[in-house]
Image: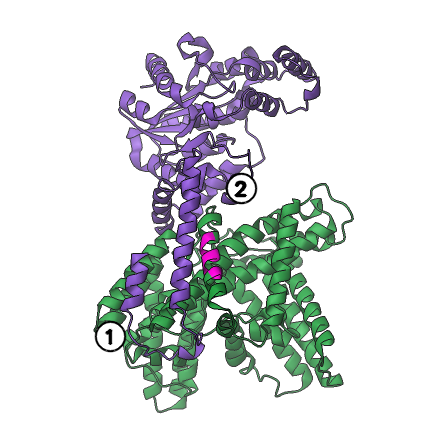
Chain colours: A green, B purple
């Protein structure tokens, strides 16, 4: 099997939310948005800004966005007008072929090629293809799923075909969520294009606050506090004692959460300052009671997409238990591969699929539901530990690295050790995160913030700005989910 | 901040459907107060840093290096490309180089790094047709299998910078901001800076500063001597020495020389330079020029280098078998400057040193 053969990732992507470039871009967009009174002109400005945002990475790939937008707009419109079911099915097939064709070519061509070579090798045929060196267009996985959900919804008559090309283009391209989600559905976004969107002062300020939370999560917690520990451990796991390797594994649980949840908060916040509402993408996932609960809280827009368009299409849980189990595992493997063209991602997805099957089975057989604080806490902690361990294949650079990290979890001694300050930081950040997630399982961030006194709110905002201003001066890392 | 105020007061009443996801209590006052407090706190830290001698400086980084690397290819014959390690980066005055050669200097030296990967990258780039000056210890001229920071920076340039737009603009903006704020002082992680700031007796401005063109200046009046020199010697020596036994400079020198005797000198064979000679030939082959410079060293730093790689068995072997121009500063008394750490020039001397070096290189027809 091939460890990690994928397309060429070209850098950190378009403008990073935690960059000076984005700050200037955003201020200019806000100034234009609020200085124009004509709604159509405002949408045109937002659309041009979104294309510029994407082109700031690699201009030629804007063409892909145009193709995806035009093809799906036209197909959906034609599909809605079509009388025969056959024609509708044919148009849907074209949409699937175009969208998945692009995704398959750019993201999986090298992976499939190398995997095929690996299979031939198993039967003794030597075939060593040269890597194709295809550049992965940033965000292709996200906008492909977004446009696919639209044509699928139109096909299933869940949503009408959009008549405005401008509105549909903005739906596909809207810059806050273009490259790393949340994956927005047409019914969530397109109605917002029909009436002028101007943020109230409360929306505007809350949008800025969410953006600040997101930048803090990304630049301070993910990049500054946790990523150096993760990099150190995964670079040479066998050199460390088991306790340090466990800390590295925990640190990655935190890094990936703060990185991606941070991005989502920035996206939701930036959109809110323009008056647009994007769906939530995370809700205290490490406070989850089991794996099905985890997937209702982690990357919500992707897991609900997989459920609605893949799991249900395969029959969901309507069939026999074996078929349900197969559906779950298959959907999770495909979900894993959505994250990256490597078998380690498939392993990660497969493990989550198996956990869901096991949990499903236990619930069916025993009808057990945790009642009371202690059983719930135990279940939350067990879920957290297993989820954290399952991140290992997700982070590992191939199967050798995966085996090394797993094997090193039981090391009694090591030739290297983490700095004491790093250990304290990881434990403090992760303990606080767990407590926060457990305490806020049923409470939205807005409600939690409402419960603070004005003094606390002021202090929190001041503290976060100072931290971002002082501590985030090092290398800016790309958001992990840009590469997906 | 005025932009924030304008925008907050300019936005109109809500027509969005997202009001169900808003905090119920008004936020404007808390956020504005938080912003004002944060700006004041940051200003206090900035002023305190300036008060104790910290000055704004650009942070040397792979992004900044990539910016210079882009120039190297674009400038063609006009480029004067500097490759090497800290000596090339700290000792050369780029303004003097530009004025005395008429060429445009491109600083690609990387502090504390191998330079052969950079030379290999330049040799492989058909766009590199200018003049290349290379400096570094003779042992760095031999091909090695391991990778270091130079490889990482080169890879960054090719995969994450060269063909992309955003990183170029962000690097430009970031270096502008860094020139304006002392919070970014000289590559020290801001967290360390803060710890130093609140630890009595530990606050000392860093002796290195970086310009947007990657020229680095060392101000040795800001370091504690002789400890700085001793640490530099020990780092180059790579062996532990019991400093408890040191009562005088002579004791220290004896200890270092004794430690040195435990290792045998390295004698280099011509074939060990085949790789660097091949790279040289590629640059010469397309009309470029290349010169290798052995920068001055003094005191124990020179003694360590000369013991490990004696000139006649190292540099001279390389020079005899290279088609490039070779320049050993030991042969030029005019280049005898005081080196506070035995290895690098103080910022006050680099202008005169660069002028003398260019004069010597002109005599060898490099320019």
**x then y, percent, for residue B89:** 43, 28
B189 and A384: which one is in front?
Answer: B189
* Residue nearer the viewer, B307 or B282: B307
Residue carrying label 2: B198
Q: Secondary structure at mark 2?
A: helix
* Res B84 visible: yes
Left/right placement of residue A457 relative to residue A230 reads left
The answer to which image quadrant residue A102 occupies is bottom left
| Visible residue check, residue A104 | no
- In the rendered structure, find residue A39 and report the number of the disc placed on it: 1
Q: Which residues are magenta?
A: A459-466
Residue B215 in percent (x, y) is at 39, 30
Observer-side mark, 2 or 1, equals 2
- Which quarter of the picture shows residue B264? top right
User: In the image, is residue B258 above or below residue A53?
Assistant: above
Q: In the displayed structure, would residue A234 be above or below residue A85?
A: above
Quarter assignment of residue B69: top left
**A461 part of magenta stretch:** yes
Where residue A343 appears, as percent x and y from the top left, is: 60, 61
Prevalent SS, magenta region? helix
Chain for disc number 1: A
């Amino acid at each position: 099997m091939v460890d990690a053969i994928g397309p060429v990732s070209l850098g950190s992507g378009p403008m990073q939310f935690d960059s000076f470039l984005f700050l200037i871009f955003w201020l200019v967009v806000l100034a234009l948005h609020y200085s124009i009174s004509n709604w159509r002109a405002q949408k045109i400005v937002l659309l041009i800004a979104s294309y510029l945002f994407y082109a700031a990475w690699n201009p030629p790939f804007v063409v892909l966005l145009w193709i995806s937008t035009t093809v799906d707009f036209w197909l959906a419109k034609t599909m809605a007008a079509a009388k025969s079911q056959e024609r509708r099915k044919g148009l849907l097939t074209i949409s699937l072929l175009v969208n998945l064709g692009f995704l398959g070519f750019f993201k999986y061509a090298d992976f499939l090629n190398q995997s095929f070579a690996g299979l031939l090798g198993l039967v003794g045929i030597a075939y060593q293809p040269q890597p194709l060196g295809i550049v992965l267009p940033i965000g292709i996985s996200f906008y492909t799923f977004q446009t696919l959900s639209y044509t699928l919804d139109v096909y299933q008559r869940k949503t009408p075909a959009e008549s405005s090309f401008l509105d549909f283009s903005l739906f596909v391209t809207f810059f806050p969520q273009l490259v790393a989600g949340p994956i927005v559905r047409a019914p969530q976004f397109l109605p917002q294009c029909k009436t002028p969107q101007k943020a109230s002062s409360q929306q505007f300020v809350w949008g800025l606050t969410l953006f600040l939370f997101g930048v803090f999560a990304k630049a301070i917690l993910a990049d500054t506090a946790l990523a150096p520990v993760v990099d150190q451990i995964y670079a040479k796991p066998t050199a460390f004692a088991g306790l340090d390797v466990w800390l590295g594994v925990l640190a990655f649980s935190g890094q990936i959460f703060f990185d991606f949840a941070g991005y989502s908060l920035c996206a939701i916040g930036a959109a809110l300052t323009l008056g647009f509402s994007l769906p939530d993408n995370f809700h205290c996932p490490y406070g989850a009671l089991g794996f099905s609960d985890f997937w209702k809280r982690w990357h919500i827009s992707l897991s609900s997409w997989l459920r609605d368009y893949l799991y249900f299409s395969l029959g969901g849980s309507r069939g026999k238990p074996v078929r349900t189990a197969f559906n779950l595992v298959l959907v999770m493997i495909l979900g894993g591969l959505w994250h990256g063209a490597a078998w380690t991602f498939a392993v990660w997805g497969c493990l989550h699929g198996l956990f869901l099957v096991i949990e499903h089975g236990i619930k069916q057989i025993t009808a057990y539901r945790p009642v009371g604080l202690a059983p719930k806490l135990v279940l939350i902690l067990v879920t957290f530990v297993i989820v954290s361990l399952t991140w290992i294949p997700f982070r590992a650079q191939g199967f050798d690295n995966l085996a090394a990290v797993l094997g090193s979890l039981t090391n009694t001694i090591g030739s290297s050790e983490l700095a004491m300050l790093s250990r304290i930081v990881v434990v403090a950040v992760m303990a606080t995160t767990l407590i926060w997630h457990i305490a806020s399982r049923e409470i939205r961030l807005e409600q939690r913030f409402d419960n603070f006194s004005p003094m606390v709110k002021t202090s929190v905002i001041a503290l976060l700005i100072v931290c971002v201003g002082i501590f985030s001066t090092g290398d800016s890392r790309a958001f992990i989910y840009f590469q997906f | 901040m005025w932009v924030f105020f304008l925008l907050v007061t300019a936005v109109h009443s809500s027509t969005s459907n997202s009001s169900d996801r808003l905090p119920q209590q008004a936020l404007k006052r808390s956020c504005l107060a938080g912003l004002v407090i944060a700006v004041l706190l940051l200003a206090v830290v900035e002023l305190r840093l300036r008060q104790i001698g910290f000055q704004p400086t650009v942070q040397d980084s792979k992004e900044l290096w990539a910016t210079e690397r882009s120039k190297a290819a674009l400038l063609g014959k006009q480029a004067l490309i500097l490759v090497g390690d800290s000596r090339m980066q700290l000792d050369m005055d780029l303004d003097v180089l530009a004025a005395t050669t008429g060429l445009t200097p491109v600083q690609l030296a990387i502090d504390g790094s191998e330079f052969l990967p950079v030379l290999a990258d330049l040799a492989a780039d058909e766009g590199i047709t200018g003049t290349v000056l290379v400096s570094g210890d003779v042992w760095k001229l031999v091909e090695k299998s391991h990778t270091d920071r130079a490889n990482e920076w080169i890879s960054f340039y090719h995969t994450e910078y060269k063909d992309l737009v955003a990183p170029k603009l962000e690097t430009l903006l970031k270096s502008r901001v860094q020139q304006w704020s002392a919070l970014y002082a000289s590559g020290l992680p801001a967290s360390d800076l803060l710890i130093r700031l609140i630890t009595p007796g530990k606050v000392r401005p860093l002796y290195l500063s970086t310009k947007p063109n990657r020229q680095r200046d060392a101000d040795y009046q800001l370091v504690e001597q002789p400890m700085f020199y001793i640490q530099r010697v020990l780092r180059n020596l790579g062996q532990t020495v019991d400093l408890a036994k040191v009562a005088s400079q002579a004791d220290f020198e004896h200890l270092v020389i004794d430690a040195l005797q435990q290792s045998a000198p390295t004698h280099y064979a011509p074939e060990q330079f085949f790789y660097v000679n091949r790279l040289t030939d590629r640059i010469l082959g397309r009309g470029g020029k290349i010169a290798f410079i052995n920068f001055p060293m003094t005191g124990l730093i020179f003694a360590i280098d000369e013991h490990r790689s004696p000139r006649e068995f190292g540099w001279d072997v390389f020079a005899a078998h290279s088609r490039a121009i070779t320049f050993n500063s030991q042969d030029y008394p005019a280049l005898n400057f005081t080196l506070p750490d035995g290895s690098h020039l103080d910022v006050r001397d680099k202008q005169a040193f660069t002028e003398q070096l260019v004069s010597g290189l002109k005599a060898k027809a490099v320019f």
